[in-house]
Amino acid sequence: MTALILLSGIVLLGASVQWLTGMGFALVAVPALILLLGPAQGVALANCAAGAISVVGLAGGWRRVRPAAMVPLCAAAACTVPAGTWVTRQLPQPLLLLLMGALVTVAVALVMRGARLPALHGRAGALTAGAVGGFMNSAAGVGGPPVSLYALNAGWTVREFVPNAQFYGVVVNAFSVTANGIPALNAGEWAAAGGAMAVGGVIGRAVGDRMPDRHARRLVLLLALTGGVTAVAKGVWTL
């Protein structure tokens, strides 16, 4: 029962965050999910949940998707997803925890600094962000930060970023689910996760109407940073 309550709470928080910002389920939820379910199952569940939330979110904003940027992003991600899956299958669990926690922590730090990187400009930047994001999404469930950095360097507004992030989330998580498989949850765990996603969506929309974008963004990054550092500490402890 305790595990079900923890699972529901993690998924609810991640879903609320994704509805607030257009991206962020994995950043917030993955560190906790891998501690609760293990790296492979935690990442697989994050891929499924983030992809499903992105499908629903994209329904109302697909007309604002920018094909010129998203096609190279998604094509590059498709090429690197298998590499991320292969890496996770070669490493023992403590090293996986270290890898995933480190990826989350570094990615959050770069986004918090608002890093301006020449490598993320133009078509080459889209390919770079997509390739790194695809690898990170299948390896650690967190493919969003490279896309966030690309959007930051391209000067996108939040209104422009959200539908494109949702589109990327649909595509890259579909690739990742194909590579990583469906998580082996029982019926009760699936029900808990599904119910938490629905409730999280309601909460995220309600809070999103009242919370300024900068506050929502700061909350997501602080939660993600805490989770990433915790995963690193757990990996070090179990080595």
Image (cartoon, rainbow, N blue to C red):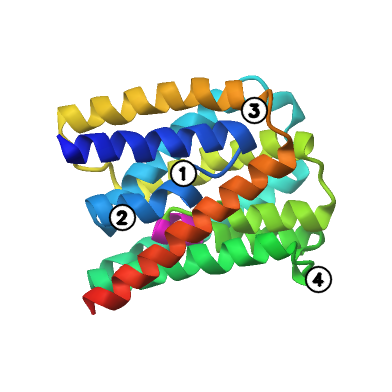
Mark with earlier residue (4, 1): 4
Q: Quadrant of the N terminus?
A: top left
In the picture of the structure, the residue carrying the numbered disc 4 is: 118
Q: Amino acid at mark 4?
A: Pro
Side of 116 where 230 appears, left or right: left
| Residue sitting nearer the eye, 189 or 62 | 189
Which secondary structure lies at badge 3?
helix
User: Dividing the picture into quarters, in which one does residue 209 lie?
Assistant: top right
Q: Nearer the viewer, mark 4 or mark 3?
A: 3
Q: Is residue 236 magenta?
A: no
In the picture of the structure, the residue carrying the numbered disc 1 is: 173
In the picture of the structure, the residue carrying the numbered disc 3 is: 208
Q: What residue do we see at 47% from left, 33% from top?
A: 15
Q: Quadrant of the C terminus?
A: bottom left
Mark with earlier residue (2, 1): 2
Is residue 87 among the parts visible in the rendering? no
| Residue sitting nearer the eye, 181 or 11 | 11
Which secondary structure lies at badge 1?
helix
Q: Which mark is residue 34?
A: 2
Q: CA distance from mark 4 to mark 3?
A: 32 Å
Q: Amino acid at mark 2?
A: Ile
